[in-house]
Amino acid sequence: MKRDDDLTSRADRIGPNILMITGEFPPSKGGIGDYTSLLATHLGRRGARVTVITRGNQPYPDQRGQSDAVSVWRTMREWGFASWPRLVSAIGRCRPQILQIQYQAAAYAMNPAVNLLPAYLRLRVPTIKIVTTFHDLRAPYLFPKAGTLRPAALHAMDKTSHATVVTNHADLEALGGPAAQRSSRTVKRWLIPIGSNLECAPPIDFDRASWRRQIGAGEETLTVSYFGFMNSSKGVEYLVQALSLLAGRGLRWRLLIVGGEAGDSDPTNRGYSQWIVHLIKSRHLQDRVYWTGFVAGDQVSAALLSSDVCVLPFRDGVSLRRGSLLAALAHGLPIVTTFPSHPDPLLVDGENVAMVQRDSPSALADAIEQVWLDRAARERLASGARALGQRFRWPDIAARHLDMYETLLGQDR
């Protein structure tokens, strides 16, 4: 464990001094925490100094699991307005050039204080540049019947940040496109994709046939994988219903639900997960479904590689902001998913994913069966997924962030 003096002793490193705020961080379970940890690590490898402030009650930096370039302060007891003075104190101690907020409403308990934080800090600490990364555009909770005020809180956060980062084309357009800084030609909004939080790195002794035998799947048994936490936006009920239809057609299959049921930031998802369990039992499918639970990364990787098709039936359509999609791409899996509301030029139906109508068990069942029976289509989708996954490497993501930081800091030169 390192104290304040240890933090400032790293001042001879090359690269910007960055303070990241995140509502979750390992060992808490959640995609935003994993993303922040990986981004901080790769920025550190490229010479940046990164301090992460997250939830907890520890008075000094915690270096567990991080490099010398990354310090973790678990000092935020809550995310409301009462946390602001504590955050200003932390800024005074680590003296960052850039403060970056990793934003997802659920990770901050839906509290609107984080949405007003950029405006407050610009007044209180005008010497630093403030960046907000929008991991999604879910609005915070304000009060009953807040209506249009809720999305207005997102736009206020975007407006009062020096720069904002979005992870996909749809969110970029929803905020108004790249835009530009006032009285400047500098880009206001940056499109920087996320990477997979999971490496394609199974155990050294991984044997696919052996893994499949553990869940009762022979080579002629369709093995479907689902990866990611469960919540109502994931459409898992449609996957269960689609597989029930395939069982009625006489198709032999196993469903491999990989990972935990719910993350730590949004415990209400446990209710949805319990409903999925009830749905599986009500259709007498429990003997065909295998849950891995929370397991080490190499075990998750092995489970995914043991499947024939990964199915991600998002209710709001496929998006490159979904970490589960990025993991499936990194593993080169044939992916069946749903059409997005706003097409993404990188996602091509029939080439790197197979897309179907949203909220339709029958369309999902037809697509799964077609991909399973057409080996050439499976191989084409797998090859396309693998190629697309190469575009989301963490060293490149870190380099893109450093370009943004340099641009922001260069405005004052």
Image (cartoon, rainbow, N blue to C red):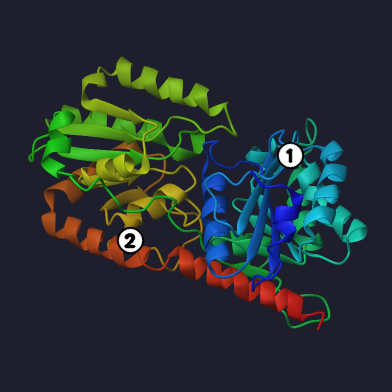
Distance between the alpha carbons at the discs numbered 1 and 2 = 45 Å
Tag 1: residue type?
Thr
Q: Which dot marks residue 185?
A: none
Q: Which residue is found at the position 28% from the left and 40% from the top? A: 225
Circle 1 Cα neighbour tier, 10 Å, few/some/many (<14 / 14–19 / ≥20)? some
Q: Quadrant of the C terminus?
A: bottom right
As drawn, which residue projects farthest toward the right? Answer: 123
Residue contact between numbered discs 1 and 2, judged by CB atoms under 8 Å: no
- Mark nearer the N terminus (1 vs 2): 1
Tag 2: residue type?
Asp
- Is residue 116 among the parts visible in the rendering? no
Q: How many marks?
A: 2
Q: Does 92 sit left or right of 254 as displayed?
A: right
> Which of the two residues, 409 or 277, is positioned nearer the viewer here?
409
Q: Which residue is found at the position 92% from the left and 59% from the top? A: 123
Q: Name the residue under label 2.
A: 349
Q: Where does the image place residue 405, in percent across and percent down from the top left?
A: 68, 72
Q: For the residue labelled by badge 1, is the local secondary structure a helix, a strand or a loop?
A: strand
Q: Where does the image place residue 37, in percent across and percent down from the top left?
A: 55, 51
Q: Quadrant of the N terminus?
A: top right
Q: Where does the image place residue 344, in percent across and percent down from the top left?
A: 46, 64
- Is residue 309 among the parts visible in the rendering? yes
Nearer to us of marks 1 and 2 is 1
Circle 2 Cα neighbour tier, 10 Å, few/some/many (<14 / 14–19 / ≥20)? some
Q: Which dot marks residue 75?
A: 1
Hey, which quadrant is residue 351 in on the image? bottom left
Q: For the residue labelled by badge 2, is the local secondary structure a helix, a strand or a loop?
A: loop
> Which of the two residues, 301 or 16, is positioned nearer the viewer here?
16
Hey, which quadrant is residue 134 in on the image? bottom right
